[in-house]
Image (tube, grey):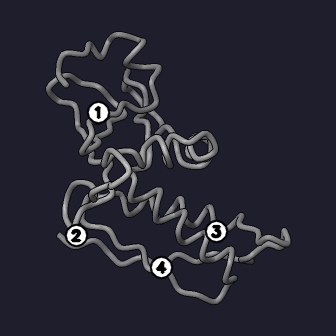
Amino acid sequence: ETTRDPANTTLGKRAIVHFAVDTEVAWMTTRLAKESTRWFHYNLGRNNGAGNPDNPKGHRTSYLWEQVWERDALLDILNRFVHVEPTPKGKANEGAIIFPRFHQWDAVLQIAAHARENGAGNNYLVQHSAGSGKSNTIAWLAHRLSTLHNDADKKVFNKVIVITGGTSG
């Protein structure tokens, strides 16, 4: 989409995220910039590749309204995931809005659900490809685990320690 005017406050500065969705695939961005807009995939993956798996009950993108845009899920995303990076000093632009991509959101929820059910004492590996938002996923996960309570309302972890490898390249 390159025809939307990013200066339009209805579509630009007031929107948290923009989705481009058809029956097969979904993309998202948090900043419209005409031809410079960076669209990120928002798909489940298909056979260890891009896209979405077949859905015998409907559209391949139905997970969006069935899971991601479901009321409680969307409120959780807005409360625990979305944040605005501060604007660097001397810059006139607003800070960048960070909205989780599907694989990030899904990883955090799956690991938190496992920890809630199985308690402390497990190791978890968050593995994404280069440029896929590993640092944000790890930060969201660490924060979620540090406040996680089980069904008996007992805190699951006393401490959360994050060990990361250095970057290469």
Q: Amino acid at mark 2?
A: Asn
Q: Residue at x 22, y 54 (%)?
A: 51
- Residue receiving disc 2: 48
Callout 1 secondary element = strand
Circle number at residue 20: 1
Q: Amino acid at mark 4?
A: Ile
Q: Residue at x 36, y 78 (%)?
A: 165
**Nearer mark to the viewer, of 2 and 3:** 2
Residue 24: x percent and y percent?
Answer: 24, 44
- Residue receiving disc 3: 145
Q: Residue at x 46, y 65 (%)?
A: 107
Q: Amino acid at mark 3?
A: Leu
Quadrant for residue 46, please give it.
bottom left
Q: Nearer the viewer, residue 160 or 100?
A: 100
Q: In terms of sequence position, does the residue under pointer 2 or pointer 3 come before the other?
A: 2
Residue 68: x percent and y percent?
Answer: 49, 46
Callout 3 secondary element = helix
Q: In terms of sequence position, does the residue under pointer 1 or pointer 2 come before the other?
A: 1
Residue 5: x percent and y percent?
Answer: 26, 13
Q: Residue at x 23, y 37 (%)?
A: 38
- Residue receiving disc 4: 163
137 displayed left or right of 146 = left
Q: CA distance from mark 1 to mark 2?
A: 22 Å
